[in-house]
Image (cartoon, helix red, strand yellow):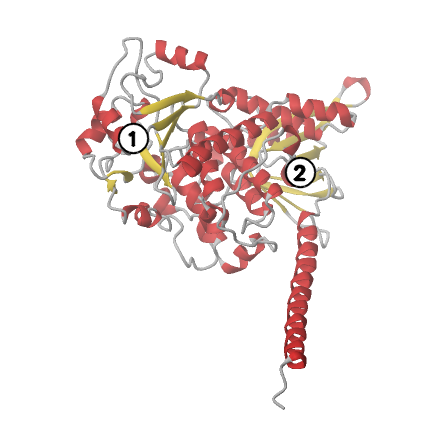
Amino acid sequence: MEFIELILINKLDGVILKYPHHDNVDGTVCITGHHLILSSRKEGVRELWLLHKNIDSIEKKETKVGGGIIQGGSLFLKCKDLRIFQLDICSTTELNLVAQTLENLSSIQDPILFYPFFYRHMHPIMENGYTLYSVEGEFTKVLATEEWRISRVNQHYTVCPAYPKGVVVPKVIDDETLAAAATFRQGGRFPVLSYRHNNGAVLLRAGQPLYGPKHRRCRPDEAILNTVVSAGMKGIIYDLRSSNAILQQQNKGGGSESAANYSQWKIYNRSMDEVDNQQQLLESFSKLIEACVDREISSDKWLSKLESSGWPEAVRNSLHTACIIAQHIHQKAEPVLIHGTRGEDATLLVCSLVQIILNPDCRTIRGLQALIERDWLQAGHPFGTRLRSGPYSASQARSAPTFPLFLDCVRQFLEQFPCSFEYRQCFLVTLFEHAYSSQFGTFLCDSDQERETRGVYDQTTSIWSWINQHDELTTYINPLYDPTPNVIWPSVAPMSYVIWEELYLRWLADQRTEEREEQYKIIRTREQHLRAQALQLRRELLDLANQYYAPSNK
């Protein structure tokens, strides 16, 4: 397919752009295969470059003049990054042509036709982000314990299409056992290591067991799990589904582990059905954004509308579940296995949040990049499918803002622990934007296998290659950062939730978060300087006192 077939009009003069907090712009629209570009001849007016993939919804409103005659109208472009643009076009024919062209181009589904395959980075790439976080490098300390190894049983993606080629598993378990266990887990997602804490306790993740109505048993799967349980101890399995959801899945051939077969494990369920239910989560996100843009509602009703969206509760539940699991690992040194149904949404979300709580490395810029690589991209979160729709469009099958939910949870950490994170909130906003639409290929496709097959690693640039450039990296560094090796426990009380206004409200109200951060930095620097002065004066005073009270030699 050629882009020319989809572009019914490529240039139009006299278009009026209306956009909150900006003056109206009278300019020319140009439509390319990947961008809508609006430019003005006036000096000082920046061009608008909008990726078609960023367009979530197109609404057309025709203008009626005297006698019911239609003369032009407006296009409302609602974007996945939450911006809303209004384009006023005076000709009805051209209005329809522009609308149809943008519908055609924003509906393209083949990743090969997306902008990252056509984008060429202007500056030299200092490091390849696609090879930056290898399984060998990320699990160096774990492999040094001699208890774990990297298995290449999935080298050709035949055991589990969603897993990467290399996964970390117990050293005493051979590849044949892994392959057998994969037949017992949803999607072939046999248990693999996600994280090893400094006390030796481990966090594993998997897909649901295919227990079914016939109560299947899989001794290889049991062997993998029992290997990580020390003598005299029991492991913990957390099934992230309600009892009803588990029963429904069992009737379909899935289910949960049998206590009789997994006697070395305690089995709990903690419902995160609102996360694994893609349609429900997307509706919740849509209601959140609807509440945010509603300017006619009173403050008390607004708060009620915000809470009734279900999004704040999804954030709190995610954080609370992560805290419970982190306690088992940190305080009791118990091994934990997490799974839901497919193991590609709530499972990855909770695994990631547990590591934010326990692992200080995940609170650094490169540490968060590595976490996203390990427990989202390489773990098979289907970014291409999940982020196909945003909050404004009609839901497409299996679309869901699971990754944006993760970013919102991390934002809650930043709110509660402003000095514990190397990155500031604008780093999370950047990840949100590029996950939906980008010139970089990192978040394309649904799995490592698909990215390799489609040539993403060879033909596109990684977002990490761009972010880690010095000039770019410095913009994301938190001026208040004070590294701490401690575990951090977020509050999950209802009043602790803070709406992420730097993202959800940024196009509706001026944001001064970064200005405040710089002011805090100045105050903090001044405080440190005064503390140092006070310490020096105390030392001088002590020296004078020692001299004055020193015994005389006479």
The amino acid pointed to by label 1 is: Gly
Residue 232, which numbered label? 1
The reply, left or right, for residue 546 in relation to residue 300 is: left
Residue 497 on image: x %, y % = 63, 33
- Quadrant holding the N terminus: top left
- The quarter of the picture where residue 164 lies is top left
The reply, left or right, for residue 493 in relation to residue 211 is: right
- Quadrant holding the C terminus: bottom right
Residue drawn at x 65%, y 35% is 498
- The quarter of the picture where residue 342 lies is top left
Residue drawn at x 61%, y 56% is 479
Residue toward you, 231 or 261: 231
Residue 284 on image: x %, y % = 59, 23
**Residue under label 2:** 501
Q: Earlier in the sequence, mark 1 or mark 2?
A: 1
Residue toward you, 276 or 70: 276
The amino acid pointed to by label 2 is: Glu
Q: Does any portion of residue 387 appear in the rendered image?
A: no
The reply, left or right, for residue 44 in relation to residue 362 is: right
Residue 19 on image: x %, y % = 71, 39
What SS does tag 2 mark?
helix
Residue 170 on image: x %, y % = 25, 37
Residue 139, which numbered label? none
Residue drawn at x 59%, y 50% is 419
Disc 1: CA contacts within 10 A as few (<14), some (14-19) or many (>=20): few
